[in-house]
Amino acid sequence: MLSNIFIIKFLSFLGLIAIFLLFYSILTVPDPMQNVQLNEADTNKTEVYSVWAIPSEDVSVRVKKLMGGLRSEFGGPQFEPHVTVVGAVRLTEEEARDKFRRGCEGVKKVYSVNVEKVDIGTFFYQCVYLLLHPTNEVVEASARCCSSFGYNSSSPYMPHMSILYADLTDEEKKKAQEKAYILDESIGNLSLQISRFALYKIEC
């Protein structure tokens, strides 16, 4: 009799365990619709993109050396030497890639451009820069790409290559400008070749 009672209690205990495991499995099975929603959210996520014209390797090495010398005295973040072709635009990655491909069609991606002088600007990203001569090739490349991206600038296109990002006083900017000529005496007469265009994800 006692053994029968023990068996019944044991079976009841096993039944409770089975019910518990069933509920646990239901709670822990991933919802396939949740994954779909997450993937769709990733696809629709927007980032800020920009199109850059990248100089040849020899010019990049030279400009990086100049940039490093300026940063060591005036601070600021490190970044790749480039000429901005299209400014900051918020898009999904798919949109950015598609517009970049279409914008580059018919654009001459290898061309030469001359530096006019080392100049200073009024905000962080144009603190000190190399002002470039606005040839037809340079201006047309920007115009075509901007049209593809639907980018409208509030000011006329000014081709340049920034060499220092920083928040400096006017006096400090002038010192940085002078320092650039000290670090590279002939930088104001540099003739550089653009070797390719690149799509960059940037932080604003």
Image: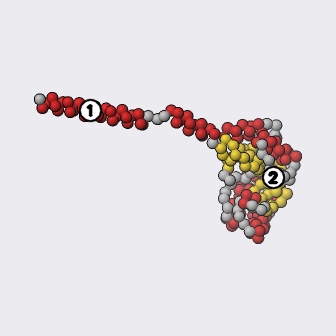
Decide if residue 105 is in sight here: yes
Nearer-the-camera pick, 63 or 126: 126
The reply, left or right, for residue 145 in relation to residue 48 is: right
User: Residue 154's spot in the image, x, y percent?
Assistant: 81, 52
x 79%, y 57%: residue = 130
Q: In the rendered structure, which amino acid carries the disc numbered 1? A: Leu
Q: Which residue is mark 1?
A: 14
Nearer-the-camera pick, 136 or 96: 96
User: Residue 118's spot in the image, x, y percent?
Assistant: 81, 61
Label 2 residue SS: loop
Quarter of the image where one finds residue 199: top right
Name the outermost residue toward the bottom.
171
Q: Which residue is mark 2?
A: 154
The disc placed on residue 159 is none
Judge whether 171 appears above or below 111 on screen.
below
Judge whether 97 appears above or below 161 on screen.
above
